[in-house]
Image (spheres, rainbow, N blue to C red):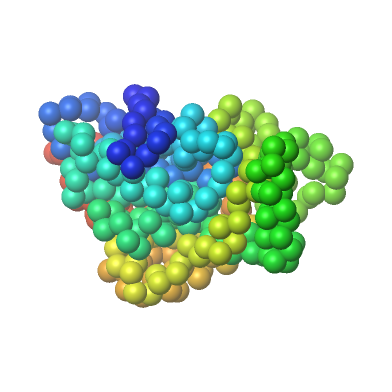
Amino acid sequence: MKSVTFKNPDMAWHIAANIQFPPAFDETKKYPAIVSVHPFGSCKEQTSGNVYGKALAEQGFVVIAYDASFQGASGGEPRFIEDPTQRVEDISRVIDYLVTLPYVDEDRIGVIGVCGGGGYAINATLTEKRIKAVVSITGVNIGRLFREGFSNYDPLAALAAMAAQRTKEARGETQLVNELLPASPGAATAAGLTERDVFEATDYYKTPRGQKQGGATRMLFSHAQKTLAWDAFAFAETLLTQPVMVVIGQQVGAFGAFRDGMEIHGRATASMDRQLVLLEHWSHYDLYDRPEPVELALQQLVPFFKRHLALVPDAGQAQAAA
């Protein structure tokens, strides 16, 4: 693995990323590449990098997992902004970097995203035609979630509160940075926060299971307004022409990945190859790192990427697989 930082001419800050290489990597050759997009409140060292990124690199892809702008080890001020437009633009910025690398085949680039990253990956694919295939792992439409559960189903009140807070901060008051999860599973239980997605998110992000320094699970409240007017799936019927695979667990939680996955699969009618992978016994956060559901997902998405990114195993690999 190689850690890198880069910036584009249109950026005032840098993007931090980890590049993972396939076995017997030879920088004189051309490889298909996959951009791995982390969830809302996550970082590159968590599921996007150390689970799906690692597994895809082992299968022959160059994989780049990166921290979103304003988050993790990437630059941008103020910190902890979750702006869907920036999150989607980051994917294009990462592709801009990839196409400068001599060992990346610019015609064989895919994207995978987890949770909110899945929604961002799909949205980027609508207009970023350098993306040749996209996989969403328990993907969530962050705009829909903010309009509903994250605003207590009162988006206008949320927008009014954000506006008032931003005015306070513009006048020099302290920023309001929301902590999105309880401090521990025990704290979640004590507070009665036992809904599946909330509790399992806490178990992932607030324990050694998934906790990483860059995965802050925080959000700058005053700068979240645009999220409520954003839709990951807008114009999908017309613009989502590339192959798309949607992987979702059937153990439903409040964040709505099952609902969103069914919706985008149904709407992706222009895709040249749309596939839905339903994992009956597994939940949203099981798909972050639990070995069995992750392996079930990989059994579907690895051949999907290999087919659409034209990764042909050499004779030795084919014989070993047989």
State whether residue 167 appears in this view: yes
Q: Is residue 320 left or right of residue 210?
A: left
The image shows residue 226 at horizontal and vertical percentages of 56, 58
Q: Is residue 303 left or right of residue 229?
A: left
Say which residue appears at 26% left-offset and 39% top-offset. Answer: 98
Say which residue appears at 45% left-offset and 49% top-offset. Answer: 86
The image quadrant of residue 6 is: top left
Quadrant location, the C terminus? top left
288 or 33, which lies in front? 33
The image shows residue 276 at horizontal and vertical percentages of 43, 64
280 or 137, which lies in front? 137
Q: Is residue 39 left or right of residue 308?
A: right
Say which residue appears at 15% left-offset and 37% top-offset. Answer: 30
Q: Is residue 228 above or below residue 282?
A: below
The image quadrant of residue 23 is: top left
The image shows residue 33 at horizontal and vertical percentages of 27, 42
Report the residue that reaches farthest toward the front: 171
The image quadrant of residue 241 is: bottom left
300 or 116, which lies in front? 116
Q: Is residue 195 above or below residue 48?
A: below
State whether residue 45 appears in this view: no
Q: Is residue 208 above or below residue 88?
A: above
Q: How many marks?
A: 0
